Every structure is written in C-alpha cells, then in structure tokens.
Image (cartoon, rainbow, N blue to C red):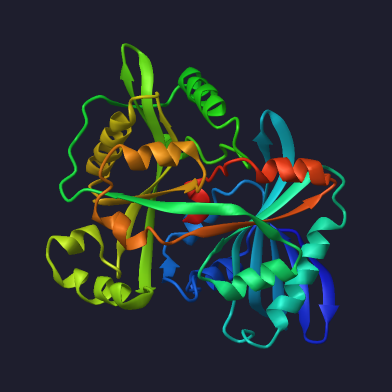
Amino acid sequence: MKKEILFTEGKYTIQRHEGIPKEAMLFLDSIAWGNEGAIYEHKNTEEHIKLIKKPVLLAIFEGEKIRATAVFNMTNVTTNGENFNCNYIRYFASSKEIRGKGVMKKFSIKVMELIREKEKEKTIYFACIEKANKSSYKVVESAGYNPLGTVKTVGFSRFFPKKEKKIAQITSKEEKAEVLNILHSTYNNHTLTQFDSLFIKDNYFVIREKGEIIAGCQYHRAHWVINNMKGFSGKIVMNVVPLIPVLNKLFNPKKFEFLAFEGLYFKPGYEQQLYALFEGLLAKEKLKSSMFWLGKTCPIRKKILAKGKLGLIHSFIKDSDVEIMTAYKNIDETKIDKLKSKPIFASAFDYI
C-alpha cells in the first residue's frame, strides 16, 4: 500500500495512503461519531471501507500514532447531464489527544490545500457534517468549504413488517441498465448525483406492475451503537425505550441494526408501493427499522412524507440534519450558483 509524507511540522506529519491501512481501520473503529447531537459508533466500518471506490487516506500522525483522518473518495457526479470530477470526504475524525489544541483546525486546512493543489479538472469537493457537530463544521469551514444545502434524515419502521410477494431482485446486466436509466431520469435535476453504491451485493429490489418498475430501492445493512442522544426526549429514548419489550425491537441503542435505503424510485402516483417495498425488505432482513437521506428541497422527499406513515423511528431521528459543505476547483461562480440552486442527491452509503 503506497504511502507518502506530504507535510511535516514539529512532531506532526500529514501522510497520504492509497487505500486504507490496518492501523487506520483500528483508529476509525475506536471513534465515537457526533458531538452535541447523537453520539454513536459504526460497527461495520471495515466492511464498508472495503467497498469505497478509490479511497485515499490523508492522516495526521503524531510520531507513529494516527491522530486524525480524512478519507477522500474520488468519483464523478452529474447535474443536468454535466459531469464533474468529485472528491468527497468520509471518516473525518480526530482523537481525543488533539481535540481542543487547535491541531485539527490547523492541519485540516493544510490537508485541504494538499488535496486540491494539483487538481486540473473541474472538481467539486464536499463533506457531510451533522448540523449539531459545530466543531467539525468550523474546522471544515476554516478549510475553505461553504454550505451547499441540507440533507434530511428520514426514518421508516414497522413493528411487524409484512412480506411483499411482488418484490423482485435486480441481478442481470439488462435489469441494472433499466434501473440506472430510470434513476438518471429521476435525479437528473439534482446536484451531486452518482450511483456508485447501487447494486452492492445485488441488493437493489423492485416491484413491477405489468412488467414496468413502479417502485425500487437499494438497501445496505448497518449496525450502530448509540452512546447518547440530545435533549430530554433523547434521554427517554436512550433509557426508557430499551426497557419496553416491543419498542426495544425497534430501537436498541446498544445494538441498533437497520437498513439504509438509497436509489429510491416510484412511478408518479405509486408512492404507497415504495412503502410496501420498504416494509417487504424489512421483513426479508428480519429487521424493524430503516433510514434514508434526501435533500431538504428534494421533491421525492416531499412526496414520500405526504403519502404515508413513516413509523415511530422517524420521530427519534427526524431532526438529525446533515449540512453539505463544498469547495471547488476550476469551476466559475455562475456554475456554482446553479449547483446550489438544485436539490441535493444523497447516497445512504455515505452516511453509514
């Protein structure tokens, strides 16, 4: 695995790794995410990292110890058919040893400079920052990133999810091309649109009517441990819900397993079939809860919210907004303003 030291100051270095070394995996596995809102741990980090497209790690080292990480995922995104090179940040994290010392802010600015300085293509850089995580927001902002818009977290749950006999798995090359054609048309007017995480483990499923796809989505299994939730209601959810037999099947903070949905599609007027698909996939995976992420101004989100009952889990997590922070290289202000005017496309895989 190729390693390069990009910058040195005192006892700290910034190292670039193509791929993610084992020591970084261990570091990320130890991180509790969040700050002033929910604090949680991802329990399948290594499995997910192995699925990331072309990951590049920039890490801050103190001597031989990793103190902070940023994983850059290189891909392409589209808006109205126009392609942009894209670098987005995942696993932006720091250890307790450097928090509050100004190290993260200072070296993060340097990391962002290093990742951008040699780029010649039209490139968008973005990071997903939880709105409640003010410290991370300030660090990313100081590195030259500005708000693009808000992504809303949506929960869907059923205590006793019903099986759906009409569900069909998408596996063939022809079927995948059919799905991609539908999704490109559906999300053409969105910004940051990309479908890199579709068809992982062949987990895209649809419902058809007379041969036509009327609802579809991809799911990923996720496992979190929730350490804290914000406010008085958060304390009730953390301390009371786990004690109630039926509710703790829906949400157990010590072992919160759920499905993350993305690539959502429904034929206009068939929103209820998407609900049936969600419920059928929960029944298939023997789970009760799921989450998905959509831009605040996304018309699909508005139609989904208007057409059915999401279930109790939505009330637990509905205020978990994410701010999309962006920086640009070789893109003029007129084009940036156009990107800002569009609904944001969100991939669930980026949030788990």
As drawn, is 264 to the left or to the right of 66? left
Seen in the picture, residue 103 relative to 163 is either above or below; the reply is below
Residue at 50%, 70% in the rendered image: 132
As drawn, is 82 to the left or to the right of 38? right
Residue 226 position by quadrant: bottom left
- The x and y percentages for residue 135 are 60, 76
As drawn, is 329 to the left or to the right of 235? right
Residue at 74%, 39% in the rendered image: 84
Residue 318 position by quadrant: bottom left
- The x and y percentages for residue 236 are 25, 74
Between 194 and 308, the residue placed more toward the observer is 308
Residue at 36%, 76% in the rendered image: 231
Between 265 and 28, the residue placed more toward the observer is 265
The quarter in which the N terminus is drawn is bottom right
Seen in the picture, residue 204 relative to 336 is either above or below; the reply is above
- The x and y percentages for residue 257 are 31, 57
Residue at 62%, 46% in the rendered image: 53
Q: Which residue, as the protein is rendered here, is positioned at the far top? A: 210
Task: Inspect this view and state whether residue 197 appears.
Answer: yes
Between 156 and 52, the residue placed more toward the observer is 156
- The x and y percentages for residue 305 are 35, 43
